[in-house]
Amino acid sequence: MTRTNGAWTFFYGSFMDLDVLKRADVVPRRFEVARLGGFDVEINPLANLVRSDRHCVYGIVAETSHEELGRLYSQGWVSSYLPVAVLVETLDGGWRTALCYVALQPATGPAAEDYVERVVRAAKAHGFPGWYVDRLKGFRGEATGR
């Protein structure tokens, strides 16, 4: 497949899992772990970002095509997510501009246990800090009402 119109995109929920992206026929050319300041993550029922001057969100910044992003975010379950421009910090201290998809009017409700587990697994696989993995694990209890 020939790719044109590349874009760096910051993924912070289940799309951090490269297998999930692959199932949607999205194969990043390159990716690296990154941190986005000025936001916090929520999972209710899907991962979403909210502005916060006290938090940061870990994820991956991946080089994809606009065509791939169109396919990915045209899926009904994420069609309410819209792109915003962000500046992420890579682990080597570099900065990269990227698109980041955020639901401005997200659905609300408890997260499915398997969804939270998928996000936690991806966070561990990418080597996110332990405190952040624990933060994501905290949504497990919310998913089950504990």
Image (tube, helix red, strand yellow):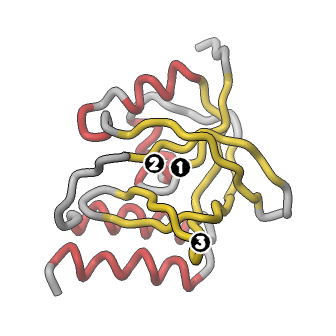
CA–CA distance in space, label 3 to label 1? 20 Å
Residue 15 got which mark? 2
**Which secondary structure, mark 3?**
strand
> 22 left or right of 103?
right
> 128 left or right of 122?
right
What residue is at 29 percent from the left and 60 percent from the top? Answer: 115
Quadrant assignment for the N terminus: top right
Residue 126 is situated, as x and y percent measured from the top left of the image, at 60, 64
CA–CA distance in space, label 3 to label 2? 24 Å
* Label 2 crowd bin: few (<14), some (14–19), many (20+), radius 10 Å: many
> 47 left or right of 95?
left
First in residue order: circle 3 vs circle 1: 1
CA–CA distance in space, label 2 to label 1? 6 Å
Residue 78 is situated, as x and y percent measured from the top left of the image, at 32, 39
Residue toward you, 48 or 105: 105
* Label 1 crowd bin: few (<14), some (14–19), many (20+), radius 10 Å: many
Residue toward you, 38 or 5: 38
What residue is at 50 percent from the left and 62 percent from the top? Answer: 51
* Label 3 crowd bin: few (<14), some (14–19), many (20+), radius 10 Å: few
Residue annotated with mark 3: 53
Q: Are marks 2 and 1 in contact (CB under 8 Å)?
A: yes
Q: Amino acid at mark 3?
A: Asp
Residue annotated with mark 1: 11
| 4 to 77, vertically: above or below | above
Q: Amino acid at mark 1?
A: Phe
What residue is at 44 percent from the left and 46 percent from the top? Answer: 102
Q: Amino acid at mark 2?
A: Phe
Residue 109 is situated, as x and y percent measured from the top left of the image, at 17, 63
